[in-house]
């Protein structure tokens, strides 16, 4: 069988390895120093980034400057659309919002908010 033959050859190699001379402490120290140098080169310490206060902390929490600019753009776009009258947005969209809501408009007339009960 080939498995038994391979196992016998492996056992023979292990017996030869056990009979060898022990490694000197100087060689062992050099090997360990080289290994530490290679490990340090493969996993360098992350570069230190300068701190600029609370804005840097917010930027780091969101994922950096690209994410912060995206959140800012989304906030400005939301604020702009919230300030514009929904009917104006409906006009800019070609009347699609009116089609979706059954021509009721996106919001009621703002004058309805100031009507008194005696006005009705």
Image (cartoon, rainbow, N blue to C red):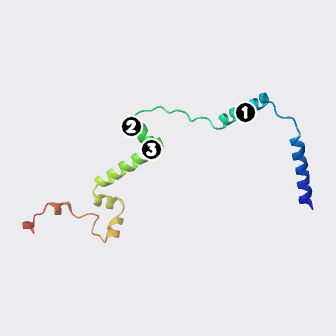
Depth check: give the residue in front, 86 or 82.
82
Depth check: give the residue in front, 6 or 104.
6
Label 3 with label 2: CB-CB less than 8 Å:
no
Question: Is 63 placed left or right of 42 in the picture?
Answer: left
Q: Quadrant of residue 26?
A: top right
Question: Is 111 placed left or right of 56 in the picture?
Answer: left
> Which residue, given by chain and number where applicable, does mark 3 sit on?
61
Spatial separation of the CA atoms under disc 1 and disc 2: 43 Å
Q: Which secondary structure, mark 3?
A: helix
Which class describes the residues within 10 Å of circle 3: few (<14), some (14-19), or many (20+)?
few
In this rendering, is residue 12 above or below 118?
Answer: above
Which class describes the residues within 10 Å of circle 1: few (<14), some (14-19), or many (20+)?
few
- Residue at left offset 29%, top offset 64%: 106
Spatial separation of the CA atoms under disc 3 and disc 2: 11 Å
- Residue at left offset 32%, top offset 69%: 101
**Residue 61 position in % (x across, y down):** 44, 44
- Residue at left offset 44%, top offset 41%: 59
Q: Which secondary structure, mark 1?
A: helix
- Residue at left offset 17%, top offset 63%: 112
- State the quadrant of the C terminus: bottom left
- State the quadrant of the N terminus: bottom right
> Which residue, given by chain and number where applicable, does mark 2 sit on?
54
Which comes before the other along the chain, label 3 or label 2? Answer: 2
Question: Is 112 placed left or right of 86 in the picture?
Answer: left
**Residue 70 position in % (x across, y down):** 44, 47
Depth check: give the residue in front, 85 or 59.
59
**Residue 18 position in % (x across, y down):** 86, 42
> Which residue, given by chain and number where applicable, does mark 1 sit on?
32
Which class describes the residues within 10 Å of circle 2: few (<14), some (14-19), or many (20+)?
few
Spatial separation of the CA atoms under disc 3 and disc 1: 39 Å
């Amino acid at each position: 069988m080939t498995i038994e033959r391979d196992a016998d050859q492996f056992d023979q190699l292990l017996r030869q390895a056990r009979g060898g001379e022990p490694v000197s402490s100087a060689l062992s120290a050099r090997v360990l120093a080289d290994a530490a140098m290679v490990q340090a080169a493969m996993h360098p310490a992350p570069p230190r980034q300068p701190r600029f206060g609370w804005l840097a902390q917010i930027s780091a929490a969101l994922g950096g400057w690209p994410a912060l600019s995206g959140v800012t753009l989304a906030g400005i776009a939301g604020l702009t659309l919230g300030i514009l009258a929904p009917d104006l947005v409906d006009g800019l969209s070609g009347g699609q919002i009116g089609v979706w809501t059954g021509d009721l408009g996106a919001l009621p007339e703002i004058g309805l908010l100031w009507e008194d009960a005696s006005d009705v």
